[in-house]
């Protein structure tokens, strides 16, 4: 207890800043809040110098109580260890740091109940905004639960920006359907006819949008229906997909994985079975995470501008005019895991 008391006394307060600068507490408060109302340039400079020398840090909780909201932003992601979400978070954090905003990151592990709970808890903390990078869900109950929490958050005065098709708040979205179309055209152009899709969790709107785009192009070309398997959105899911198609779709010459982690897992499993990605089985991923270009061979994938997406989602918070959804296009990045089909694969199941 005694050490805690000494620590409290060691932390400078706005009263200490005012005393060192020789101004009133009200004047110091206005300057440190960014206001120059009734404050001369000389006084403002003294306050800022005093705050710097004392290493003063504003009490965000006190600000929240005084203003009925804080300048803190809540960022909700499915899994910060997933490079897709970590790149988005990087963009948000970089943009927030430039404006001296605090970002709290919540990890939901693709649990819609946890997602709804975090939105409610952030609202209780009086955050100024919630950025939702987690995917929308196709399940009606999960979607209604999240919509309710987002509606309450907006009603409480906080801004909401979503990076998945939730249909509420401002939205900054990747063109997932368009990316799926790019993947289908690439494999069809390379001569593949019998392909498989590792589609990830079936309850995610992102998965269904990517799959819809792929199937639309594939079916329009009159090609055989792909074999689709639903697995987890990680390396283990990609490994499982390769094991499944080895027995269930042995004539497949290509695999479209719904994210790069799955594609990397598929490459690993194929290698363990004695095969080579791009030779025995063409593999294309989605996202273009940093590791995709470092694989051997390099992973062909659909690039999503993830960091740019995060930066733009933050920037939208300051756009009072509002506006329609913003959609970021995807790009095909061809590397070594896809090749033109010149003969049937000799891969053994």
Image: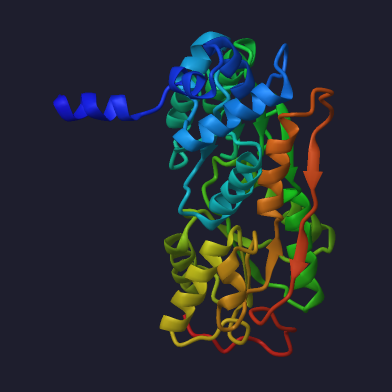
In the figure, is residue 124 to the left or right of 344? left
Q: In this view, does 268 lie above or below 163?
A: below
Q: Quadrant of residue 286?
A: bottom right
How far across and down, in percent of the image, does residue 238 sit? 49, 65
Q: Is residue 130 visible?
A: no
Q: Can residue 347 be seen in this view?
A: yes
Residue at 47%, 72% in the rendered image: 247
How far across and down, in percent of the image, does residue 39 sit? 70, 16
In the figure, is residue 212 to the left or right of 72? right
Q: In which quarter of the image is residue 278?
A: bottom right
In the figure, is residue 48 to the left or right of 315? left
Residue at 59%, 34% in the rendered image: 101
* Count of numbered circles in the view: 0
How far across and down, in percent of the image, does residue 346 sit? 57, 89
Q: In front: 301, or 80?
A: 80
Residue at 47%, 69% in the rendered image: 265
Q: Is residue 323 above or below residue 65?
A: below
């Amino acid at each position: 207890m005694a050490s805690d008391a000494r620590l409290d006394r060691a932390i400078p307060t706005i009263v200490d800043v005012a005393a060192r600068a020789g101004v009133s507490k009200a004047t110091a408060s206005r300057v440190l809040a960014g206001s120059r109302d009734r404050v001369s340039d000389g006084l403002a400079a003294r306050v800022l110098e005093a705050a710097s020398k004392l290493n003063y840090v504003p009490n965000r909780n006190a600000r929240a109580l005084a203003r009925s909201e804080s300048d803190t932003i809540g960022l909700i992601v499915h899994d910060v260890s997933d490079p897709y979400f970590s790149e988005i978070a990087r963009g948000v954090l970089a943009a927030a740091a430039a404006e001296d905003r605090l970002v709290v990151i919540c990890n939901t592990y693709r649990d819609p109940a946890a997602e709804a709970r975090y939105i409610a808890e952030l609202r209780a903390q009086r955050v100024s905004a919630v950025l939702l990078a987690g995917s929308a869900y196709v399940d009606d109950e999960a979607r209604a639960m999240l919509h309710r929490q987002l509606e309450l958050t907006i009603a409480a005065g906080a801004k909401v920006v979503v990076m998945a098709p939730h249909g509420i708040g401002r939205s900054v979205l990747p063109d997932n359907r368009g990316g799926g179309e790019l993947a289908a055209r690439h494999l069809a152009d390379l001569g593949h006819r019998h392909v498989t899709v590792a589609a990830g969790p079936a309850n995610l709107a992102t998965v269904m949008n990517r799959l819809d785009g792929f199937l639309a192009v594939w079916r329009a070309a009159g090609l055989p229906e792909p074999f689709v398997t639903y697995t987890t959105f990680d390396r283990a899911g990609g490994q499982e997909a390769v094991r499944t198609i080895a027995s269930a779709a042995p004539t497949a010459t290509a695999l479209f994985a719904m994210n790069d982690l799955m594609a990397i897992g598929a490459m690993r499993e194929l290698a363990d079975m004695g095969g080579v990605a791009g030779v025995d089985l063409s593999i294309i991923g989605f996202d273009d995470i940093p590791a995709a270009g470092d694989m051997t061979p390099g992973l062909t994938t659909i690039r999503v501008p993830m960091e740019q997406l995060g930066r733009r989602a933050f920037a939208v918070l300051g756009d009072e005019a509002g506006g329609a959804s913003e959609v970021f296009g995807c790009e095909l990045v061809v590397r070594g895991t896809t090749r033109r089909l010149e003969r049937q694969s000799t891969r053994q199941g």
